[in-house]
Amino acid sequence: MKIVLQHLTKIFPSRNKKSDEEVVAVSDFDFEIPDGKLIGLLGPSGCGKSTTLYMISGLQKPSSGKIFFGDDDVTELSTENRGIGLVFQNYALYPHMTVKQNILFPLQNLKGEDKMTKEQMLQRAYEAAKLVQIEQLLDRKPSELSGGQQQRVAIARALVKMPRVLLLDEPLSNLDARLRLQTREEIRRIQKETGITTVFVTHDQEEAMSISDMIVVMKAGVVQQIGQPQDVYDDPANLFVAKFLGTPPINVFDGHVKGGKLYVGEDAVLEIGGVADQEVAVGIRPEGFVLDDNGPLVCKPVNVEVMGRDVSVVSTHPASVNPLVRSIINADNRFDLGNESVRYTIKPHKIFIFSKDNEERLRFEVK
């Protein structure tokens, strides 16, 4: 099911009695979600991603704009008539019911042409439980399940109605690290098997990038960039996107362009074209550093973190915006922490420059 969001905006009244200033939670969101894809809505707390999800679900009505499921305008349609499955962060299971009863509950409320026989409902519930691999837990209560198992029950309950659209609101937030990894892989598997168009809300960029077909990065209610995860990582539209994506995060420096050269502090690190002389912010991905005894970028080493396959050299630089600079190098490169300085050349496709005025990306050519 294709989802089309046309100029979607949500404005809340001011909570401050002394001020009439309204709060714009989502501003002019315009996007088409392709049929059968998993889309990640990504951004920090308060960026408007959950509000967008609630408008798609019908739990909140947009202040302006329209929502289409396929060719159907569902903007004014109630939640129960949209054909959605919704999974919340806190699972929202009925504690007095068994797993089977929790999954059956949405089917028992169907009326009219959609009403099912008891045998049909039991068969559908079992199929949903089998899909999320909890068919052996049907007679247990939620209190007898782990967090990951409870989340699977919530997903099965959302899927049992065979929804047109599946909506997930930070479904992994309450799980430990190992379970998060396992459950996100399960969510991707289930989505691929069912082919249901899915919208996944998270503030965790690693989660969004690992399972999404496309990600939508949001900030303060405004869409910053939309694209395939790797494309957005490799080609950020602005400094916010560059900083939000990546672990470890991108290194940011104060720099300037002068006479066709890009400077990080006083170090001329690259010859470039297409950018006028000006003060800029320079972003370098951690994997963009190459150890080079004659390299133009000079840092002062502080520590070396061994990660097995790779090594993270932690250093300082007078122009660094952050206290520390992290550069990831291959573990085959032996690094002596006793050195007073470490020199790097920079991979051109791993370095980005941004305007000091509006933090927008400045495109350049490597000479």
Image (cartoon, grey):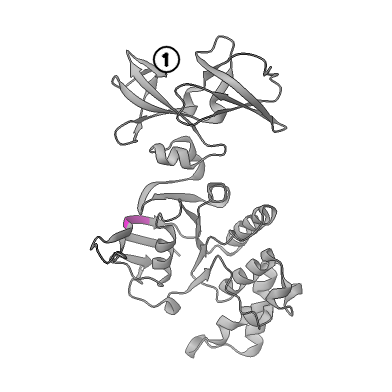
- Residue in the foreground of this view, choosing between 328 and 225: 328
Left or right: residue 148 versus residue 325 is: right
Dominant secondary structure of the residues highlighted in magenta in the image: strand
Q: Where does the magenta region start and end?
A: 27-31
* Up-down relation of residue 160 to residue 335 (above or below): below
Q: Residue 109 vs residue 268: left or right?
A: right
Q: Nearer the viewer, residue 75 or 148?
A: 148
Is 324 located above or below residue 35 in the figure?
A: above
Q: Of the residues shown, which amino acid type is indicated by label 1?
A: Glu
Q: Residue furthest top?
A: 294
Up the image or down, 172 lies above or below 94; here it is above
Q: Is residue 101 visible?
A: yes
Report x, y in % for residue 283.
45, 29
Give the percent coordinates (x, y) of residue 95: 64, 79
Occupied quadrant, residue 58: bottom left
Q: Name the residue located 57 percent from the left edge and 73 percent from the top edge.
A: 92
| SS state under label 1 | loop
**Which percent across, then down, holds residue 26?**
34, 58
Q: Quadrant of residue 242?
A: top left
Label 1 belongs to which residue? Answer: 266
Residue at figure coordinates x 32%, y 31% from the top left: 356
